[in-house]
Amino acid sequence: MRKAIKWIIGASLIIAAIIALALAKQSAPLPQPQTTAEPIRIGLLLPLTGDGAAYGIPIQRSALMAQEEINASGGILGQRLEFIFEDGKCEAESGAAAAQKLIYIDKIKIIFGGACSSETLAAAPIAEEAKVLMISPSATSPDISNAGDYIFRTVTSDAGQGAIVAEYAYHTMHMRSAAILSEQTDYAQGLRNVFSARFQALGGAVVADERFLSKDTDLRSQILKIKNSGAEIIYLSPQTLPTSELIMKQLTAQEVRITLIGNENFVARDMIAKQPALYAGIVTSENYINEQDPLMSAFVTKYESQYREKPTLLAYMANMYSQLYLFKEGIEAVGSDATKLKDWLYTVKSWKHALGELTFDENGDRVGEYAIKEVQADGTLKELSVVKPQ
C-alpha cells in the first residue's frame, strides 16, 4: 500500500513538473532574430596631404561634424553613416587612383569630392562608367559641367565666377588693361581662361599673361614682366592657399603697386586674419553665403568650438557639411541606390541649408550667386556686391 501511495505521489510530481515546464515555455518570450542594419558607406576623396590639405582638412572636418550629428540622431533610416577617406592630393593621378580604390575595392556607390578640379576631373570618368554618384563641394572647373550624368557639385562653376570678376573689374572698377598671373592647374587655368575671354570681350586688353608651375617658388621673372606691362589691374589665379601667400609676398617684395583682384583663395578667412596687411585691398569673390543665416551661424560656432580655429574657405566647408544633410533627405526619399539618388538630385530646387539655397541645373552644377568682397586692413571681408550669372 505504501509503495502504491509513493508511486502515485511520484507520478503526480513528474506530471506537475512536465505541465509547469510546458506552461513556462508558452509564457516565455520567443527569441527575436538579430537585426544589424548595414551602415551607409560614403567615400570622401579630398586632398589630405600637400598644399591642398590647407582646405582639404577643413572640408573633411566639416563632413565629420555632419556625420557625428546625423549618427547621434539615429542615422539615416536607422543606418549609421560610415566614411572611407582617400587622399586625392589635389592631383589628377592620385585622384584617379583614389576613385579606383573606392569604387572597385571598397565597393563604394557614393563619393563626396574631389575638392580640387584636377582630382575631380580625373576621378569623374571612372565614377561615371561605374554609375557611382559623385558630388564635389569645391571643384569649380568649367569642364566638370560635361563630366557625366552622375557628377554633381554644390559649388558654382568658374564659367560664372571668372566672367563676373572680369565684369566687375571692367564696369565697376573701370579697368581697361589687365595682367594675369596663374598657376598651371585645371582649376586655376579654368578661371584664367574665362576671365581673359570675358575681359577682352568687354573691350579690355590683357597686356601680360604669365603662368607658373605648382612646383615653382621663385616668381620674380613673371612678376617683373607684369610690373612693366602697364596693366591697371592684376588677376591672380593660384591653386592653393600656400601659393596665394607666396604670390602676395613676392608682389610685396618687388614693390608692385597695381590693383589686385583674385580668385576665391583670397577669401580664406584664417589665412588673411593671420597677415591682414599682406592681403589688405585685394578684391576677390566666392559663392554667396549668408553668414547671418541661423544654420550657417550655428555651423561656424560649432566648428570654431570643436576645432579651435576659424573656418578657412567657408563656402566650401558649408557645402560639404550641407551635402550630408542633402543626401540624408535623398536616401530617406528614394533609398541609397546611386541611380535613383542621381535622378532625385536633378529635381532639387531651392533646397535650403547652411550653404544657402541650392538648385541643380541640367549638368548637375549648382545655380547660385557670387559675392564680390574686399579684404580690409583688419583682415575682415567687406561685401561689395552680390551678382547672379546671366
Image: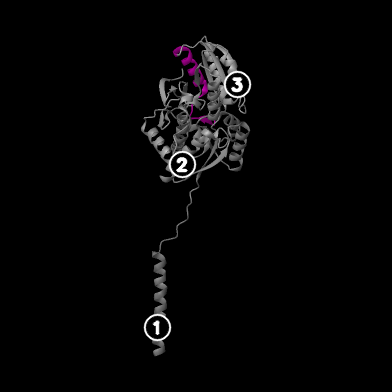
Three-letter amino acid code at the position of disc 1: Ile
Task: Report the magenta residues as a range.
Answer: 148-172
Question: Can you give x and y, in whole percent of width and height, for residue 323 in the image?
Answer: 46, 35
Q: Give the residue at mark 1.
A: 8
Residue 148 seen: no
Label tally: 3
* Residue lying at 42% horizontally and 45% vertically, measured from the top left: 72
Question: Can you give x and y, in whole percent of width and height, for residue 232 in the image?
Answer: 51, 13
State which tag comes first along the sequence, 1 or 3: 1
Three-letter amino acid code at the position of disc 2: Gln
User: Is 153 in front, or is 162?
Assistant: 162
User: Is 53 in front, or is 39?
Assistant: 53
Q: Give the residue at mark 3.
A: 220
Image marks 1 and 2: residues in contact by CB distance under 8 Å: no
Asked if residue 14 lies in the magenta stretch, the reply is: no
Q: Which mark is residue 208?
A: none
Q: Residues within 10 Å of mark 3 (few under 14, many from 20)?
A: some
Q: Give the residue at mark 2.
A: 67
Q: Considering the numbered disc 1 on the image, is that residue within a helix, a strand or a loop?
A: helix
**Disc number lying in front (1 or 2):** 2
